Amino acid sequence: MALISAKPTRDTLTLHLSAEERDLIDRAASSTGKTRKDFILNAARRAAEDALLDRALILVRAKAHRTSPRPNKLLKQTMQRELPWAKA
């Protein structure tokens, strides 16, 4: 019995760019070793995921939200460390 493997469908997206925008994208793509298409697709995918994650609703039980963590050895050590951004 032969298995039929369907190719995933792809859509076309057309962009109208200024020469400056195209050159900027081309330089960035070249510097990362990617084609223009791959660079734009990766950047758009990352931006889309970030936008959705920024708006994700995180549900927390009310009790968990109101309580503080119990002090333990690791928490105490962490709270006593010098702040990395406070170093001179």
Image (tube, grey):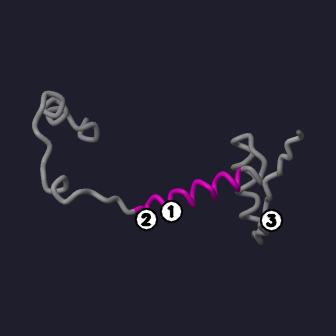
Q: What is the three-letter code of the residue carrying label 3?
A: Thr
- For the view shown, which residue lies furthest in the left direction? 71
Give the mark nearest the N terminus, 3 or 2.
Answer: 3
Callout 1 secondary element: helix
Quarter the C terminus occupies: top left
Identify whether 1 is placed above or below 77: below
CA gap between label 3 and label 1 equals: 22 Å
**Residue receiving disc 2:** 55
At a point 16% along the width and 29% down the height, the residue shown is: 77
74 displayed left or right of 37: left
Give the mark nearest the N terminus, 3 or 1.
Answer: 3
From the top left corner, tell me how far across and down residue 81 is, in percent.
19, 32
Residues packed near mark 3 inside 10 Å, few (<14), some (14 to 19) or many (20 plus)? few
Q: How many marks?
A: 3
Callout 2 secondary element: loop
Q: What is the three-letter code of the residue carrying label 1?
A: Ala
**Residue receiving disc 1:** 51
At a point 23% along the width and 40% down the height, the residue shown is: 86
Type of secondary structure dominating the magenta stretch:
helix
Mark 3 in CB contact with mark 2 (< 8 angstroms): no
47 displayed left or right of 38: left
Residues packed near mark 1 inside 10 Å, few (<14), some (14 to 19) or many (20 plus)? few
Residue 12 marker: 3
From the top left corner, tell me how far across and down residue 69 is, in percent.
14, 43
Quarter the N terminus occupies: top right
CA gap between label 2 and label 1 equals: 7 Å
Identify whether 84 is placed above or below 29: above
Mark 2 in CB contact with mark 1 (< 8 angstroms): yes
At a point 69% along the width and 49% down the height, the residue shown is: 28
Q: What is the three-letter code of the residue carrying label 2?
A: Arg
Q: Which residues are magenta?
A: 39-56
At a point 79% along the width and 69% down the height, the residue shown is: 14
